[in-house]
Image (spheres, rainbow, N blue to C red):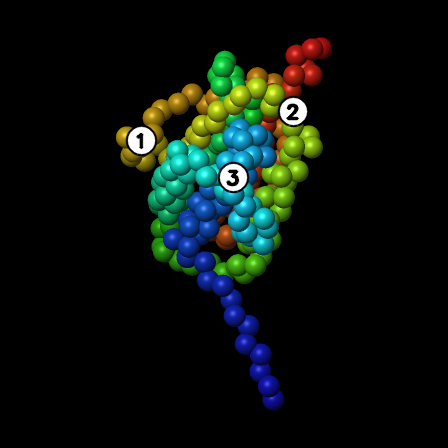
Amino acid sequence: MASKTVAKDIITLRGSAAIVSEFFGYAANSILYNRGVYPEESFAKVKKYGLPMLLTEDEDVKSFIANLTSQLSEWLEAGKLQRVVLVIMSKSSGEVLERWNFSIETDGEVVEKGESREKSDKEIMREIQAIMRQIVSSITYLPCLDEPCVFDVLAYTDKDVAVPFTWMESDPKLIANPQMVKLHSFDTKIHKVDTLVSYKNDEWDDQ
């Protein structure tokens, strides 16, 4: 009688940290492209997560995102990262226009005991695909950014984390009375990432 072997994907803490930090890099690129923070011609098309994705060719931004994902991976592996926020601000006034909030829940048992978890790579990819598609479609409901903008990234960590000299303490860069849209989440079974975008709604200012 023929038998069927079903392969299961084992997710380790280091592997999960790599998946999540890589996701942040691609998500940041997608947000910067789709929200027009940098010119369209400064991005190159690649394929990732079974989707066409855009990556910046601006050397300063590339370096910033590479350093960011490297540091995030370290904090994720230590179980010390709580949230990452990509903030888009007016270049002239510094006013915060959008906050892309990625909240992270970590399986503490995995961090403490070095255990692994099981989840299909394909299932994780499908969950990430859904978020990436929502980032692309965000232009249909987010207000047009009709002025030059800049971005920054905030990382919320446990208080006992040593902060590298390249990072500095920051205010939370909040938006008064924001509109909020919750996006999909994804879960490696070790790290769960919930996504939310909040934005300044000028219509409220006119009322």
Looking at the rendering, in which quadrant would you find the N terminus?
bottom right
Marks 3 and 2 close (CB-CB < 8 Å): no
Question: Residue at horizontal 53%, vertical 21%?
Answer: 148
Q: Is residue 66 left or right of residue 176?
A: left
Using a 10 Å C-alpha cutoff, classify the residue at mark 3 as few (fewer than 14 neighbours), some (14 to 19) or many (20 or more).
Answer: some
Q: Position of residue 43 (x, y in %)?
A: 51, 39
Amino acid at circle 3 = Phe
Viewer-side residue, 189 vs 182 = 182
- In the rendered image, which residue does mark 2 sit on? 143
Q: How many numbered discs, if any?
A: 3
Mark 1: which amino acid?
Answer: Thr
Q: In the rendered image, which residue does mark 3 sit on?
A: 43
Task: Give the CA separation, mark 1 to mark 3.
Answer: 26 Å
Query: Is residue 79 in view?
Result: no
Residue furthest to the front: 41
Quick check: 4 above or below 84? Answer: below
Left or right placement of residue 29 versus residue 73 in this view: right
Q: Which mark is residue 166?
A: 1
CA gap between label 3 and label 2 equals 22 Å
Residue at (52, 23) in percent of width and height: 149
Q: Residue at x 42, y 50 (%)?
A: 18
Q: Secondary structure at mark 3?
A: strand
